[in-house]
């Protein structure tokens, strides 16, 4: 009886020391000392043969039951320690940690500027249309009063897709959005008030204010009583709404074969406020658009009577406008896809 009590005492001591274990190394040590070949249980079992016969049965059964309890408790402890180890490892998921903020995409600054300019013109009664970037030579030049071999073709250095072989119509990347003037007039009757935003391409060297891919917004208004004053009023209103009251606006005579008279419009340079710097080529002004009254020959080409209809047209550079508005000093930043630049807007 004494041996049985002693066995139970040892078993509960082993269980309580097992409870305190929190590393796999000390668990292994416990297993060897308790359940191993030279462990506590083995020595209890060995000692049974030296007990009086009448005590052996009870002592043996207490030792075997105790061994089973210790083995079960060992198994449970081993599982607990394994589970803890895997939840602490680096590839596990800690659901209590705060989530990583997802970065929100934004519209490109050129797209934002197109939308801002478009909303000004929409509020003035203009509609928005789009047209093809790969264009026939007929629309890019001929119908804009720039016939084959006309020196004005050199105004726009062209990227050709297919130059004319055997007198077939040449195909090119449009150098400006003006071909849409002809396309729209050809397929509709006045009154027309429309803007056409889109990409254009020029075979030219790049610098701080020139890119080979640029975005323009073309404007066209045709009606029976449109004058040059309407053109100036519309463009002043646009400049005031986009740049604010304080910026200086300058109109100068300019030549475009598809308008007469023709002008260009500039805004005072944001960097030097008109004093002259490298961005504005020391002129104090940055040109943002060309404009004028639609040339009678363009009207004739789309079967409009130039005696009956008058119209104005303009074509503005969107990147140049964004440069002025946001004080961007190099146009090449727009298309290098550097997030440090793009995420500022
Ligand atoms: C034209 O493209 C004419 N189609 C504009 C026009 C339309 C005149 C209707 C009359 C009537 P121009 O080549 O000047 O004109 O370009 C117009 C504007 O596009 C310029 O004022 C400038 O803001 C922008 N631009 C021109 N070339 C570049 C370039 N390489 N890089 C960036 N912007 C440019």
Image (cartoon, rainbow, N blue to C red):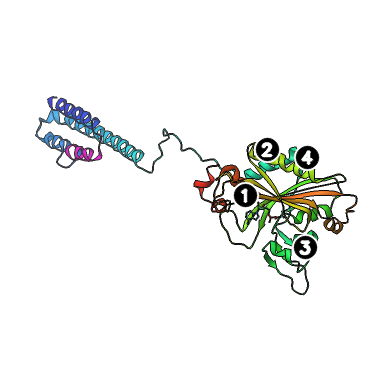
Q: Earlier in the sequence, mark 4 or mark 3?
A: 4
Q: Is residue 113 above or below residue 67?
A: below
- The answer to whether 145 appears left or right of 158 in the picture is right
- Per the model, the C-alpha gap separating discs 2 and 3 is 34 Å
Find ligand 1 in the image and state its quadrant. bottom right
- Per the model, the C-alpha gap separating discs 4 and 1 is 27 Å
Image depth: mark 3 or mark 1 in front? 1
Image depth: mark 4 or mark 1 in front? 1
Circle 3 sits in a helix, a strand or a loop, which is it? loop
Q: Which residue matches tag 4?
A: 125
Q: Is residue 286 above or below residue 123?
A: below
Say few, some or many: other residues with alpha carbon within 10 Å of mark 3 (under 14 / 14 to 19 / 20 or more).
many
The quarter in which the N terminus is drawn is top left
Residue 108 visible, this angle: no
Q: Position of residue 47 (x, y in %)?
A: 11, 35
Q: Which mark is residue 286?
A: 1
Q: Position of residue 100 (x, y in %)?
A: 46, 38
- Residue located at (68% from left, 46% from top): 250
In magenta, the rendered stretch is 22-34
Q: Position of residue 189 (x, y in %)?
A: 87, 49
Q: Earlier in the sequence, mark 2 or mark 3?
A: 3
Task: Determine if the C-beta at disc 4 is less than 8 A from ligand 1.
Answer: no
Q: Main secondary structure of the magenta part?
A: helix
Q: Which residue matches tag 3?
A: 146
Q: Are marks 2 and 3 in contact (CB under 8 Å)?
A: no
Q: Which mark is residue 308?
A: none
Q: Earlier in the sequence, mark 3 or mark 1?
A: 3
Q: Which residue matches tag 2?
A: 241
Q: Nearer the viewer, residue 49 or 16?
A: 16
């Amino acid at each position: 009886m004494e041996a049985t009590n002693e066995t139970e005492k040892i078993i509960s001591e082993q269980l309580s020391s097992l409870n305190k274990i929190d590393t796999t190394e000390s668990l292994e040590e416990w297993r060897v000392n308790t359940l191993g070949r030279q462990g506590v249980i083995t020595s209890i079992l060995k000692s049974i043969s030296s007990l009086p016969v009448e005590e052996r049965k009870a002592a043996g059964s207490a030792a075997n039951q105790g061994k089973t309890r210790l083995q079960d408790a060992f198994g449970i402890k081993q599982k607990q320690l394994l589970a803890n180890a895997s939840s602490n490892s680096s590839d596990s998921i800690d659901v209590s940690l705060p989530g990583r903020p997802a970065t929100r995409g934004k519209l490109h600054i050129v797209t934002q500027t197109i939308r801002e300019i478009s909303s000004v013109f929409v509020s003035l009664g203009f509609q928005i249309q789009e047209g093809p970037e790969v264009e026939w030579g007929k629309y890019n030049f001929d119908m804009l009063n720039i016939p084959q071999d006309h020196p004005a073709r050199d105004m726009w250095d062209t990227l050709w897709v297919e130059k004319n072989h055997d007198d077939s119509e040449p195909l090119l990347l449009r150098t400006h959005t003006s071909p849409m003037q002809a396309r729209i007039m050809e397929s509709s009757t006045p009154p027309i008030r429309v803007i056409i935003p889109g990409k254009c391409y020029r075979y030219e060297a790049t610098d701080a204010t020139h890119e080979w891919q640029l975005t323009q917004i073309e404007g066209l208004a045709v009606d029976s009583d449109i004058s040059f004053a309407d053109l100036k009023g519309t463009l002043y209103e646009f400049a005031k709404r986009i740049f604010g009251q304080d910026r200086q606006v300058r109109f100068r005579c300019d030549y475009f074969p598809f308008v007469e008279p023709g002008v260009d419009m500039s805004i005072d340079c944001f960097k030097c406020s008109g004093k002259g710097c490298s961005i504005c080529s020391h002129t104090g002004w940055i040109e943002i658009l060309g404009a004028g009254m639609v040339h009678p020959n363009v009207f004739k080409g789309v079967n409009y009577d130039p005696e009956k209809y008058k119209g104005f047209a303009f074509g503005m550079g969107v990147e140049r406008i964004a440069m002025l508005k946001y004080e961007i000093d190099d146009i090449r930043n727009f298309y290098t896809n550097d997030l440090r630049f793009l995420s500022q807007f």
